[in-house]
Image: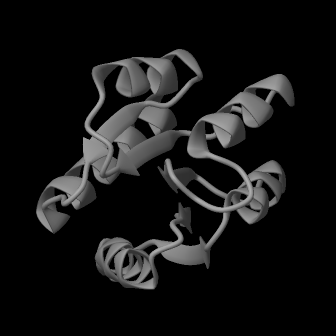
Amino acid sequence: MRALVADDSAAVALLTSRALAAIGCEVTTVADGIAAFHQGLSGAFDVALLDMIMPGMLGTEVLAGWAEAGLSLPTIVFSGVDDENLTLRCLELGALDFIHKPFDVRELQLRVRVHLAHTKVS
């Protein structure tokens, strides 16, 4: 399983990467929205974890760009912004899930496992 982690916080990216590695994911991390957009387009990932507020492009812009390009990358958005409209917008743009920061590592791992299992069944 290959995971893309996009977060401009080095501490969050490290925590998330370690959590995903612990469940068997090979992780690539990026620190800005433009890099996340381009890495996602590579088609090399089974799941993406995408922060909302990043330099270059916001997470919503990344999601919109992926959708416009026809990319179907299972994406879990995670953000410290607690706004119901933002959550709904991300889901409308194709995100599978939205997790509020700070998050519980075990919950994150479980959600990733569930989404990867569902994607394999579909």
| Left or right, 120 with reference to 78 | right
Counting from the top left corner in percent of width and height, residue 15 is at: 31, 80
Q: In the picture, residue 18 is in which quadrant? A: bottom left
- Check the image and report above or below for 77 versus 70: below
Is residue 57 found left or right of 58 in the rendered image? Answer: right
Residue 78 horizontal/vertical position (percent): 37, 49
Rendered residue at 82%/49% (across/down): 41
Residue drawn at x 36%, y 49% is 79
Percent position (x, y) of residue 97? 36, 34
Q: Is residue 81 visible?
A: yes
Position of residue 122 relative to residue 17, above or below, is above
Residue at 74% x, 26% y is 67
Q: Nearer the viewer, residue 119 or 18?
A: 18
Splitting the image into 4 quarters, where does residue 59 fall?
top right
- Label count reads 0
Residue 88 in which image quadrant: top left
**Residue 114 visible in the current orientation:** no
Where residue 43 appears, x then y in whole percent? 78, 52
Residue plotted at (24% across, 55% down): 101
Pick the residue in front: 93 or 111. 93
Locate residue 31 relative to residue 21 in the image: left or right.
right
Pick the front one: 104 or 100: 100
Q: Is residue 96 left or right of residue 44?
A: left
Judge whether 111 appears above or below 22 on screen: above
Q: How is the image coloured?
A: one colour
